[in-house]
Amino acid sequence: MNLCVYYSKGKMLFDLTQFVPMQYLRKPIVILTLALSMLVGCLNNDTDNSKVVANVYGKKLHLSELEDIFPSNLSKEDSIQILKGYVDRWVRKQLLLNRAEKNLSEAQKDVSSQIEDYRSSLLIFKYEQEYIRQRLDTVVPMNEVENFYNENISNFILNESIVKALFIKVRLDDQYYGKIKELYKSSKEEDIQALDNIAYQVVIKYDYFNDQWVPFSQILKELPEPISNPERFLLRNKSIEMSDQTFAYFVSIQNVVHKGNQSPIEYEVDNIKSIIVNKRKQRLIQKLETNIYNDARNYNHFEIFLD
């Protein structure tokens, strides 16, 4: 029988107990020896004593190159599929590479300048990221957010409607279903507190967005049926009641800012902070480049020969 067994990072990808009595498999050295022995029957030897898994026009893929492709805790079947997929992709790549080598001219195959450009760009990028990591201040105070918002207010126009709302999903057969339906639209403090006390104990989902702006589309995704014209719906309605075979869905809309209007600053805080931090990154990189250039010029580390 031509039996192939792969062994990687201490994991057997084929079950040796199907072929070898259990008492011989209790010692790891026996398992490894048996696995390597069985490999001899199905994989070719190479000069560096590494097993060859595939060979394309003389270019070989060794078993030692596959050690890192297997995630932990895989089943035998999944490991085999990963192995087959990796080898198949490797073979296809080598076939395409071989065809390219044969059909491109020597000038076309000379990619040394592109490789050097890529290496240079990659090294510069890594250095800049490390430089930024060590020096970037990511804390953005609220007054800086407000200043940015006020200076760029025309850029903050909503491309979708946002709401402050309450969303509840509850089982139709829940004993508190009727009480929740009675309370969810109320703005009275005692009703809100009573609803909180009930909802946190029994409902499937309870999102209280009365103090936070959220896209109306985010709430619509939770409903069992679509609303055909959300913008028109928001102009005419302050609540939603829907149900399917198991659950009821209640939405109480407390406030709305419609698409095309000025976006409230509260809704833009995270976005503005991200913009400010990115601008700080750009300034750090520009300062780095300028300092390096000026230092090199001051010490005559470069020369430019232009008439």
Image (cartoon, grey):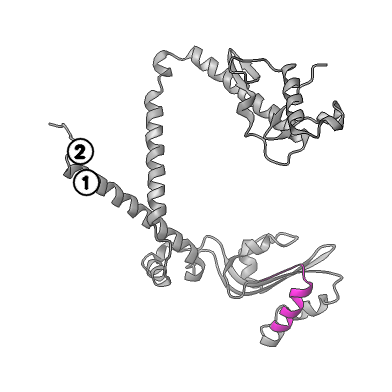
Q: Residue at x 81, y 63 (%)?
A: 244
Q: Position of residue 247 (x, y in %)?
A: 81, 66
Q: The residue tagged with tag 1: helix, strand or loop?
A: helix
Mark 2, residue position:
301
Q: Are marks 2 and 1 in contact (CB under 8 Å)?
A: yes
- Is 221 contained in the magenta span? no
292 and 113: which one is in front? 292
What residue is at 74 percent from the left and 60 percent from the top? Answer: 225
Residue at 62 percent across and 21 percent down: it is 50
As drawn, 287 above or below 61: below
Residue type, numbered disc 1: Asp
Query: Residue 203 colored magenta?
Result: yes
The overriding secondary structure of the stretch rendered in magenta is: helix
Q: Quadrant of residue 208?
A: bottom right
Image quadrant where residue 69 sits:
top right
Q: Position of residue 215 (x, y in %)?
A: 59, 64
Instruction: Give the magenta range.
Output: 193-207
Which quarter of the figure is the C terminus placed in?
A: top left
The picture places residue 186, in percent across and down from the top left corner, at 70, 82
